[in-house]
Image (cartoon, rainbow, N blue to C red):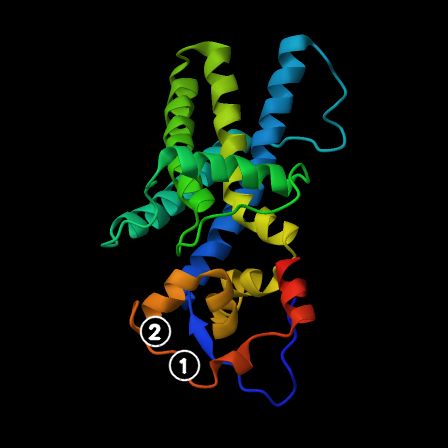
């Protein structure tokens, strides 16, 4: 994490307002028990199907767990779709893939980086919403829809165990995709971005210029925007920049 020098005024650029930060926390609060109840239900199904008993003593289920899971799932679905619709409603449609091949390649590369299977983070994506984020949003839409459909199939009894397996896969993918951005920031040791998502809602101007240059240029007036006088003084020292990059 970059450290600001004592006595130096650092310009902050707003990224999220209080409502968005609140939505992040609500989604996270719903997601954790949603995952927990889903895993318990899958364990109970596995135990009943294969007649393996005794594995539910440490974390026992409770009466009405299915209803709890359904309500939590509806909450996750609603919050997720509202968040996505907010982005789709924007004029420039920033979450839609612009080059599916390049976006998918950047997405796979970033997943490998998260799990220490690639030496560097994604490259060649200098837009406000990076390539892996755009593909993540699209994949999340598909998984939310698939999870809702397979949930209805389970409720109606259609497709039996196949519907259950598809529902579990879709649910796990939703959990991974929801935490994908957070995992990426943790992998990069990027405390500034994490703090902006869950606490402050803003980032230092030097950080935005370094990591989201096209967004910074747009904020400052586009291609012909004059260079800010004295702006280089806000840039971190080399050791601080390395700390931000992780």
Judge the density around disc 1: few (<14), some (14-19), many (≥20) Cα neighbours within 10 Å. few
Say which mark, if any, is on residue 228: 1
Query: What residue is disc 2 on?
Result: 220
Judge the density around disc 2: few (<14), some (14-19), many (≥20) Cα neighbours within 10 Å. some
Q: Earlier in the sequence, mark 1 or mark 2?
A: 2
Residue at the outermost bottom position = 7
Q: Secondary structure at mark 2?
A: loop
Tell me which residue sits at (51%, 29%) in the image.
66
Residue 27 percent coordinates (x, y):
47, 49
Q: Secondary structure at mark 1?
A: loop
The reply to whether the C-beta atoms of the residues labelled 1 and 2 are less than 8 Å apart is yes
Residue 172 percent coordinates (x, y):
54, 31
Looking at the rendering, in which quadrant would you find the N terminus?
bottom right
Residue 218 percent coordinates (x, y):
32, 66
Tell me which residue sits at (62%, 10%) in the image.
49
- Numbered disc total: 2
Q: CA distance from mark 1 to mark 2?
A: 9 Å
Residue 162 position (above or below residue 129): above
Tell me which residue sits at (53%, 35%) in the image.
108
Looking at the rendering, in which quadrant would you find the C terminus?
bottom right
**For this view, does 63 lie left or right of residue 52?**
left
Residue 13 position (above or below residue 71): below
Any part of residue 166 in sight: yes
- Residue nearest the viewer, comparing 102 with 14: 102
**For this view, does 122 lie left or right of residue 77?**
right
Residue 115 percent coordinates (x, y):
66, 39
Identify the image quadrant of residue 236: bottom right
- Residue nearest the viewer, comparing 98 with 38: 98
The residue mark sitting in front, 1 or 2, is: 1
């Amino acid at each position: 994490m970059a450290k600001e020098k004592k006595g130096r005024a650092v310009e902050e650029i707003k990224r999220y307002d209080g409502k968005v930060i609140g939505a992040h926390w609500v989604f996270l609060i719903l997601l954790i028990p949603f995952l927990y109840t889903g895993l318990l239900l899958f364990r109970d199904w596995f135990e009943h199907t294969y007649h393996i008993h005794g594995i539910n003593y440490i974390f026992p289920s409770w009466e009405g767990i299915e209803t709890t899971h359904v309500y939590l799932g509806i909450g996750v679905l609603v919050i997720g779709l509202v968040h996505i619709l907010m982005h789709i409603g924007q004029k420039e449609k920033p979450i839609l893939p612009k080059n599916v091949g390049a976006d998918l390649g950047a997405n796979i590369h970033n997943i490998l980086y998260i799990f220490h299977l690639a030496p560097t983070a994604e490259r060649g994506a200098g837009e406000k919403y990076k390539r892996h984020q755009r593909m993540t949003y699209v994949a999340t839409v598909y998984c939310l829809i698939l999870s809702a459909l397979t949930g209805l199939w389970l409720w109606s009894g259609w497709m039996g165990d196949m519907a259950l397996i598809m529902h579990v896969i879709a649910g796990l993918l939703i959990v991974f995709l929801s935490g994908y951005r957070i995992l990426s920031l943790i992998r990069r040791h990027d405390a500034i971005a994490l703090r902006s998502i869950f606490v402050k809602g803003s980032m230092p101007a030097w950080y935005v210029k370094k990591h989201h240059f096209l967004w910074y240029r747009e904020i400052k007036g586009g291609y012909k925007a004059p260079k800010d006088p004295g702006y280089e003084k806000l840039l971190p020292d080399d050791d601080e920049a390395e700390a931000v990059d992780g």
